[in-house]
Image: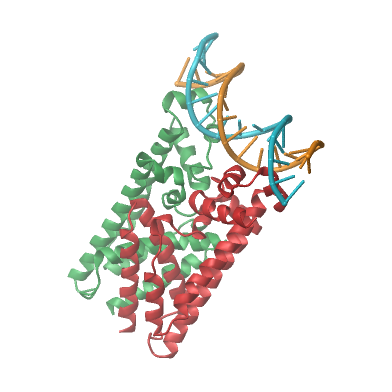
Chain colours: A red, B green, C cyan, D orange
Amino acid sequence: MERLIRSAQELLWERGYVGTSPKAIQRAADAGQGSMYHHFSGKAQLAKAAIERSGEELREAAEEQFASPGTATERITRYLERDREVLRGCRIGRLTADPDVMADPTLRKPVDETFGWLRGRLAEIVAEGKRKGEYPATIDPDQTAATIAAVLQGGYVLARAANSDEPFELAVQGLINLLQEASA
Amino acid sequence: MERLIRSAQELLWERGYVGTSPKAIQRAADAGQGSMYHHFSGKAQLAKAAIERSGEELREAAEEQFASPGTATERITRYLERDREVLRGCRIGRLTADPDVMADPTLRKPVDETFGWLRGRLAEIVAEGKRKGEYPATIDPDQTAATIAAVLQGGYVLARAANSDEPFELAVQGLINLLQEASA
DNA sequence: GTCTATACCGCGATAGAC
DNA sequence: GTCTATCGCGGTATAGAC
């Protein structure tokens, strides 16, 4: 059952919801039909468990950099420059391209909550930077937080299109540069 | 045949490559099996035609704002703030989530070229802004171009996750603000 | 709890008539 | 050029044995 969730996470990451069959998950998890349908009511419920798990992991990974010491720009930069498997894309962001996930509220919810948390957390850090005089009053925390999250998500898109990490790295460095200009 | 391509464009936009069946395209185009397989060798080739068409349309639409008068920031802002069907996402960017598209070089090519063109075009505009003293020397055109394109692509992702235009608008305004700070 | 068998459906493509 | 018939395969789920 643990293996089923992990395998579902991997396959959802790689092939999305529409592109992932229960059978493929079972094969990857080395489990039979009966086992899967005993623990889960079907594909959707297993996917829900897998998406929630991936969301938790994303939060934990991000919080590592967010909670690190330094200025707001330093912590954001550390988050942006963290090692990532760029060409695999974002496990959560990927799912927004999936019509069946977006159409099912119970599947969209963990996706929504994950990005809601991420943007909120980034906004807090930017707001803290403003309070400490790192950023000018013209910087809006909610806007800037959305911009930061968007650059990552969009960076993945550009990288996959080009089949190269480069556009991702460019986009991230461009953003870091803009943030530094703003705080200068 | 024209109808087949248009229908394929719509369905690829909405459901992606994996989620779109030849039969669904035929239904949408009001065409039969025979008709489709007469004009195209199969799903992949029809998809290729549809993606190329969508790429052309994206370029034309973008060039409208790029070619408009004003400073670099003004033209970029006009492009960013253009009316978009945010919740439908980007017809081209969407395809980067599709494993079968990414795995097939002939399908990935038009995606790659479209974003290659877009980033190049944005880089030209930023470079022009630098020459005219609008941006400081510390601004890198290629980086900034990638950042701008990424904010749009990522904005779509965040908006779809939230089922609301708001995160997209926030991300775009956050970027515009940063660009203005940089040119101030 | 896990297994195998079975069911029904739609996918993607081919064949051959018209 | 377009139509209908047909094919083999895999998706998603259920049933009932063990």
Examine the rendered structure and indicate whether residue B77 appears above or below residue A9: below
Examine the rendered structure and indicate whether residue B161 appears above or below residue B20: below
Residue at 44% in and 66% down:
A150
Horizontal arrangement in the rendering, residue A100 relative to residue B174 (left or right): right
Residue at 72% in and 50% down:
A38
Residue at 40% in and 63% down:
A84
Give residue A23's position: percent from left, percent from top: 60, 42
Judging depth in this view, the residue of B64 and B182 nearest the camera is: B182
Judging depth in this view, the residue of A75 and B61 nearest the camera is: A75
Give residue B98's position: percent from left, percent from top: 46, 47
Judging depth in this view, the residue of A137 and A134 nearest the camera is: A134
Q: Quarter of the image containing the C terminus of chain B?
A: bottom left
Give residue A173's position: percent from left, percent from top: 31, 69
Asked where in the image residue B74 lies, by quadrant, the reply is bottom left
Residue at 31% in and 48% down:
B113
Give residue A184's position: percent from left, percent from top: 30, 84
